[in-house]
């Protein structure tokens, strides 16, 4: 149970940082958590494609790649749908 809470916490921080880097703010807690998990998937995939190490993990999520993936995901959403 504690690991799940830790993963949710790390995902929310990574999602919030990634959104800020891409120019979006005010996603809320659930939006940040979802963005953090999506960012971890996108970032982990990108790292494997580029042959780069995942680096530090917390709660099972690669921290740096979750932030990078979240920022890239938000940037693509901004391009497709425009900023709010």
Image: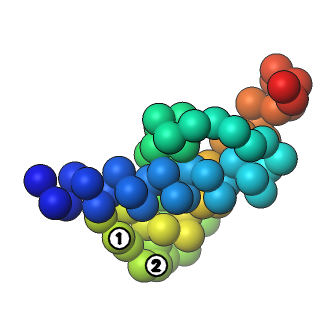
Q: How is the image coloured?
A: rainbow
The residue lying toward the viewer, choosing from 48 and 76, is 76
User: 40 and 20: which one is in front?
Assistant: 20
Q: Please state if 68 lies on the left or on the right of 45 as rendered.
A: right
The C terminus lies in which quarter of the figure? top right
Task: Answer with left or right where residue 20 lies relative to residue 67.
Answer: right
Element at label 1: strand
Seen from the viewer's position, the closer of residues 24 and 61 is: 24
How many angstroms separate mark 1 from mark 2 (CA)?
10 Å
- What numbered label is drawn on residue 55? 2
Identify the secondary structure beneath mark 2: loop
Q: Horizontal and vertical percent for residue 28?
A: 57, 37
Question: Residue drawn 35% across and 70% down?
Answer: 58
Whole-percent x, y for residue 59 in the image: 30, 64
Q: Where residue 58 is drawn, which disc sits there?
A: 1
> Local crowd at mark 1 within 10 Å, few (<14), some, or many (≥20)?
few
Most extreme residue toward the top, as rendered?
81
């Amino acid at each position: 149970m504690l690991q799940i809470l830790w993963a949710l916490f790390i995902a929310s921080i990574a999602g919030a940082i990634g959104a800020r880097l891409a120019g979006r703010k005010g996603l809320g807690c659930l939006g940040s958590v979802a963005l953090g998990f999506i960012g971890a998937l996108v970032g982990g995939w990108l790292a494997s494609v580029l042959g780069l190490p995942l680096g530090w993990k917390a709660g099972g999520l690669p921290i740096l790649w979750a932030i990078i993936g979240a920022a890239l995901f938000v940037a693509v959403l901004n391009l497709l749908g425009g900023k709010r």
